[in-house]
Image (spheres, rainbow, N blue to C red):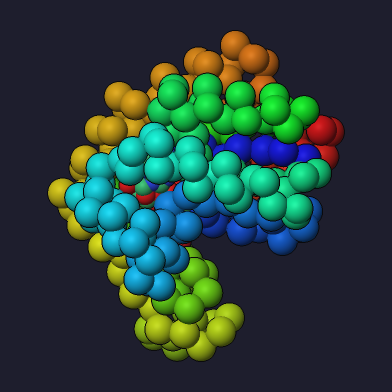
Amino acid sequence: MKILVMGPPGAGKGSQSAKIVEHYALPSISTGQMFRDAFNNNEPIGIEAMKYIKDGNLVSDDITNEIVRIRLSKHDAEKSFLLDGYPRTVAQAIALDNLLEEMGTKLDAVFNILSSNDVLFERMEQRRVCKQCDATYHLKFKKPLVEGICDKCGGTLYQRQDDTYESVKNRLEIYESKTKPLLDYYDKKGILYQINGMQEFEKVYNDIELVLRDL
Ligand code: AP5
Ligand code: MG
């Protein structure tokens, strides 16, 4: 199973991806998370990427394509994987298609999680993430049992650097201009599935599951 989860910032890509990869035992490949991990580990690529990420701009196609190429060449991604947030430009989608062709494979399904901008702003303002294991919380809809502490690993919860109002606004604009055109690209291939992301977590997941079951 080789799938891609798309959607505007805050739509629930990471939350749904976490559930899918747990259920189907897939390796999860989130470019945003890879950049944040590299930044937290003081790696040069992470420090470079964070210059763009904090203001809500995209990291260059070259850097992004390269980290995905390296990640997809690992043994565990041979048979299946889930991509979260990559590709998000037409140039990245073409690079991915070329890479998959080299690997003798292709994507099975692309999920686009939809949401209104009001909901997205609220979700990112209320989001908290575990520094240690990346688990994601929402202060209203998915509260940690103990304030500021991750239920899963006891790590400290923090607010992402790019979850400021200005950065979110910029990310939404970039999504509209650079990423939305990809929907047409995948629709023409007949592998695009639109998912209503403005439902409860479980309902969103069930809608995705209905498609995955038949792949
Ligand atoms: P990335 O980390 O991918 O961020 P994003 O696309 O902005 O999306 P988010 O992670 O903010 O949201 P999400 O859809 O995962 O929502 P979540 O599940 O957390 O990328 C960050 C940055 O890295 C980019 O801006 C860019 O700079 C760079 N980058 C990454 N990939 C790149 C690429 N390919 N090319 C170039 N640059 C790249 O949910 C959000 C909140 O809502 C949470 O609090 C959650 O608990 C809550 N929530 C989720 N679902 C529900 C629900 N159904 N009901 C109620 N609450 C919900
Ligand atoms: Mg995410």
Residue depicted at 34% across the width and 61% down the height: 44
Residue 179 in picture, x, y percent from top left: 40, 28
Residue 194 in picture, x, y percent from top left: 57, 29
Nearest the eye: 121 or 157: 157
* Relative to 142, 54 lies left or right: left
Residue at the far top: name it: 188
* Relative to 38, 191 lies left or right: right
Residue at the far right: name it: 214
Question: Can residue 114 be spotted in the picture?
Answer: no
Total numbered labels: 0
Residue at the far left: name it: 166
From the viewer's perspective, is residue 17 above or below residue 136?
above
* Relative to 119, 203 lies left or right: right
* Quarter of the image with the N terminus in it: top right
Residue depicted at 43% across the width and 33% down the height: 88
Nearest the eye: 61 or 120: 61
Residue depicted at 49% across the width and 69% down the height: 134
Question: Can residue 32 be spotted in the picture?
Answer: yes
* Quarter of the image with the C terminus in it: top right
Residue depicted at 54% across the width and 44% down the height: 68
Residue 85 in picture, x, y percent from top left: 48, 43
Q: Which image quarter: residue 59?
A: top left
Residue 74 in picture, x, y percent from top left: 69, 52
